[in-house]
Image (tube, rainbow, N blue to C red):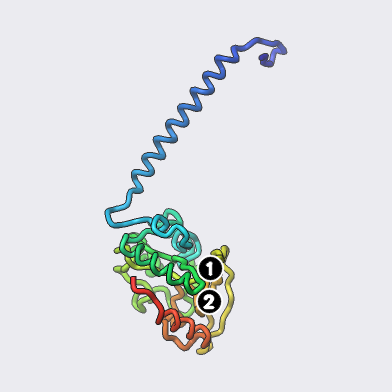
Amino acid sequence: MMTYDNNIKYHPTNTKSKQIKRIMSLLTITIVLLAFHSIICSSNTLPSGFVYVHDIIPDIQISLRYASKENFLGHVVDGYLSNVSILTEAAALGLKRAQILAKTNGYELVIYDGYRPQKSVNQFYNWSQNCNDSQIKKDYYYPNINKEDAFKLGYIAEKSGHTRGSTIDLTLILIGKKIQNPLIPIKRILTNNSTIFYLDDGTIDMGSSFDLFDDASHTNTTFVNIIYQQRRLKWGRNRLKL
């Protein structure tokens, strides 16, 4: 092998020596990366009694809105590192039974939220009290209320059941259909003449979207079309206690 330098001269090089150096450099990088991966994995060890939902229900669809920008804050929430749902083992096993029940009716479950760290709840509260927030998601998530009233009205709790790992936000989707991303906003006029946006993600339309802080989200509301009222009542009667 020959190399070319700026003086227009050729010099023979030790090809074998260069190859050995290159291999040693790659081995060093590989060892460092493996060590880093080991540290990361050990730091993600779950507390006793908690599990990753996909380890219990491999085929369940997960769409953690707080791990994305698609939520009422408009950005990823503190404590949500990836689209991976965590629950207590007991809740996950109950959810597995619910998935089986849903499938017998032609549907699958979609998880919007499971375990929620307290620091996430704290961030929600700080958001509600921040007068300087741009409120870029107001039209989609709290069109008819002031955000400082979100806790008072009960749409968010200062001590959320989610922090215990056994509370789940979920919905239904037809078997074989996948979560749609990005969401498609659809403007809707309710029976009380107020306006909301339905954020279509491919799941079964229940009249309003996940985390809509509005009367339209109440289970027994008459503000949504009768078709959506009937869907809510149907699945409310058939829900499986976890």
Q: Amino acid at mark 1?
A: Ile
Instruction: Examine the rendering and report whether any part of residue 182 can be seen.
Output: yes
Q: Amino acid at mark 2?
A: Asp
Residue 167, located in which quarter of the rendered image?
A: bottom left
The residue beneath circle 1 is 175
Question: Given contact means CB atoms under 8 Å apart, are the residues at marks 1 and 2 in contact?
Answer: no
Numbered label attached to residue 102 = none
Q: Position of residue 129 (x, y in %)?
A: 37, 69
Disc 1 versus disc 2: distance between alpha carbons? 15 Å
Q: Residues within 10 Å of mark 1 (few under 14, many from 20)?
A: some
Total marks drawn?
Answer: 2
In which quadrant will I find the C terminus? bottom left
SS category of the residue bearing label 1: loop
Above or below, comparing residue 7 to residue 224 in the picture: above
Instruction: Examine the rendering and report whether any part of residue 138 can be seen.
Output: no
The residue beneath circle 2 is 205
Above or below, comparing residue 222 to residue 129 in the picture: below
Q: Residue at x 38, y 56 (%)?
A: 52
Q: Position of residue 8 (x, y in %)?
A: 72, 13
Q: Residue at x 42, y 73 (%)?
A: 147
Q: Residue at x 31, y 68 (%)?
A: 161
Q: Position of residue 14 (x, y in %)?
A: 59, 12
Q: Nearer the viewer, residue 3 or 181?
A: 181
Above or below, comparing residue 209 to residue 34 in the picture: below
Q: Earlier in the sequence, mark 1 or mark 2?
A: 1
